[in-house]
Image (cartoon, rainbow, N blue to C red):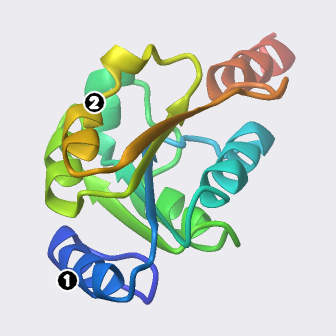
Amino acid sequence: MNNIIKDRNELIEIRKRLREENKKVVFSNGCFDILHAGHVDYLNKARAFGDVLIVALNTDASVKRLKGNKRPIVKEEERAFVMANLKAVDYVTFFEEDTPAQIIDDIIPDILVKGADWKIDNIVGRETVEKNGGKVERIEFVNFQSTSGIIDTIIKKFKD
């Protein structure tokens, strides 16, 4: 791995150090397949909630289970590389489960961030974060295109 892309065990150790340094850790997760302006805006807003932003990416197998056999478009290593090169992102990791519940339990972030399209009671990891004194924040999306919208546009433009 590199200085930003970490496996779960490395991230657990980093989290311990950050806690000792009184750093506020923000966590978000997602597929982030075909990274677009809406993702970047969302991550910049997430980062503003604390000192360190950790992003957990669904593995390719997890994306396939959630989004269907034709996804992801971009392989996990490439998604992680792009994510790791965003200014707002401090650490990137993967989770292979269908939800981030276990990695949230392992890291116990101070702030858990999801999009405003998520109902607060449906946000996976909310109880863990709140039980440990943290907060859940929801971010409104700006009017940028979604990954599915980009895929649809590409199909329409290149379909004969």
Which residue corresponds to the image point at 33% horizontal and 16% vertical from the top-left?
121
Residue matched to label 2:
124
Residue matched to label 1:
13
Q: Amino acid at mark 2?
A: Val
- Give 75 or 35, whichever is nearer the viewer: 35
Which residue corresponds to the image point at 44% horizontal and 77% vertical from the top-left?
23
Residue 57, how many percent across, how many down?
39, 51
Residue 56, how many percent across, how many down?
37, 54
**Can you tell which quarter of the image residue 156 is in?**
top right
How many numbered circles does the render carry?
2
Sequence-wise first label, 2 or 1: 1
Eyeballing the image, is 11 above or below 151?
below
Asked if residue 17 shows in the view, the reply is yes
Quarter of the picture containing the C terminus is: top right
Eyeballing the image, is 46 above or below 114?
below
Instruction: Label 1, secondary structure: give it.
Output: helix
- Give 128 or 73, whichever is nearer the viewer: 128
Distance in Å between CA atoms under marks 2 and 1: 22 Å
**Can you tell which quarter of the image residue 151 is in?**
top right
Q: Is residue 146 left or right of residue 89?
A: right
Q: Is residue 157 left or right of residue 155?
A: right
Quarter of the picture containing the N terminus is: bottom left
Q: Amino acid at mark 1?
A: Glu
